[in-house]
Amino acid sequence: MELLAGRYRRDMLQVFVLTSGFWFPVNISVAHLPIVLATGDTPVSSKGIAMALLVAGVFNAAAAPRYGMLSQRIGRRNFSIWYGVAAAVITPALCFLAIGGRDRSGNP
């Protein structure tokens, strides 16, 4: 309980916010990508969707060390701020472009 209410509370909240900001774009894409691929103009099979998610996971695994190197070069605080801003702007824009303005049922 000391982690949530004691002297480490501020540090725990900071780490929670930073990791939530990292996982938000990943969770959004994982949640919406299968729906978009399965209901788009050219539907993709479940095997194709699984492959797309696999490729995305491999890309994320390969990008993580590079993000780490960049954060060491420019500073972790600067990296976290710019990554957060980019995620807040780019993720919703890409999701909107991916679904083409349609809702989950495919309606405009």
Image: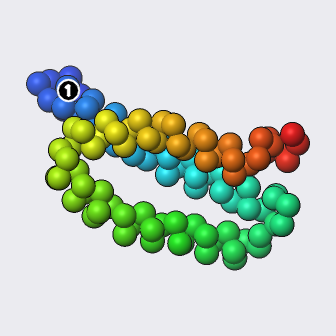
**Residue at x-position 23% and y-position 28%:** 4
Residue at image location 58% in from the left, 55% down from the top: 30
Q: Is residue 55 above or below residue 16?
A: below
Q: Quadrant of the C terminus?
A: top right
For the residue pair 53 and 1, the one nearer the viewer reads as 53
Q: Is residue 15 above or below residue 50?
A: above
Q: Residue furthest front?
A: 74
- Most extreme residue toward the right is 107
Question: Which residue is tagged 1?
Answer: 9
Judge from the rendering whether residue 87 lies leftward or rightward of residue 108; answer left or right: left
**Which residue sits at x=36%, y=64%?**
63
Q: Secondary structure at mark 1?
A: helix
Judged from this view, the residue extending furthest toward the left is: 7
Q: Position of residue 53 (x, y in %)?
A: 57, 67
**Tag 1: amino acid:** Arg
Q: Is residue 2 visible?
A: no
- Give x and y (percent) for residue 90: 53, 43
Answer left or right for 53 relative to 99: left
Q: Position of residue 49 (x, y in %)?
A: 67, 69
As displayed, is residue 16 above or below residue 98?
above
The picture quadrant where one finds residue 69 is bottom left
